[in-house]
Amino acid sequence: MIRWLVIVFLALLVFSGLRPWLEKLGLGKLPGDFRFRLFGREFFIPLASSMAIAFVGMLIGKLI
């Protein structure tokens, strides 16, 4: 279980770092992507964008 927690945490860090680039592609603004401010910092939780990217990756994996 701790392995999945670490993977989810790392994925959220990667999405947060790639957020400006992903917003140019239209990801990060989907319904289900949460953005909030807490203690002066902006946090971004891209649930819908993560699912969209996973779905595209799954389709590519099935085709190859």
Image (cartoon, rainbow, N blue to C red):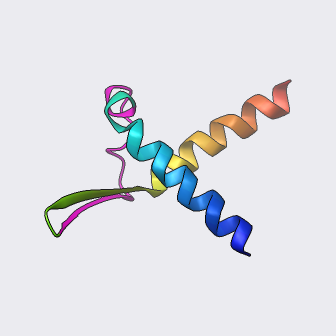
In the displayed structure, does residue 54 sit left or right of residue 14?
Answer: right
For the view shown, which residue lies furthest in the left direction?
40
**Residue at point 73%, 66% (across, down):** 3
* Quadrant containing the N terminus in the rendered view: bottom right
**Residue at point 65%, 43% (across, down):** 55
In the displayed structure, does residue 58 sit left or right of residue 26?
Answer: right
The picture quadrant where one finds residue 9 is: bottom right
Q: Is residue 23 above or below residue 48?
A: above
> Where is residue 43 drawn, in percent x and y?
29, 59
Q: Is residue 50 above or below residue 39?
A: above
The picture quadrant where one finds residue 29 is: top left
Q: Is residue 26 magenta?
A: yes
> Which region of the structure is painted magenta?
22-38
* Quadrant containing the C terminus in the rendered view: top right
Q: Is residue 28 magenta?
A: yes
**Residue at point 47%, 53% (across, down):** 48
> Where is residue 11 drawn, in percent x and y?
55, 51
> Where is residue 63 drawn, in percent x and y?
83, 26
The picture quadrant where one finds residue 53 is: top right
Q: Is residue 20 above or below residue 5?
A: above
Q: Is residue 28 above or below residue 9?
A: above
In the displayed structure, does residue 1 sit left or right of residue 48?
Answer: right
Q: How many marks do you count on the picture?
A: 0
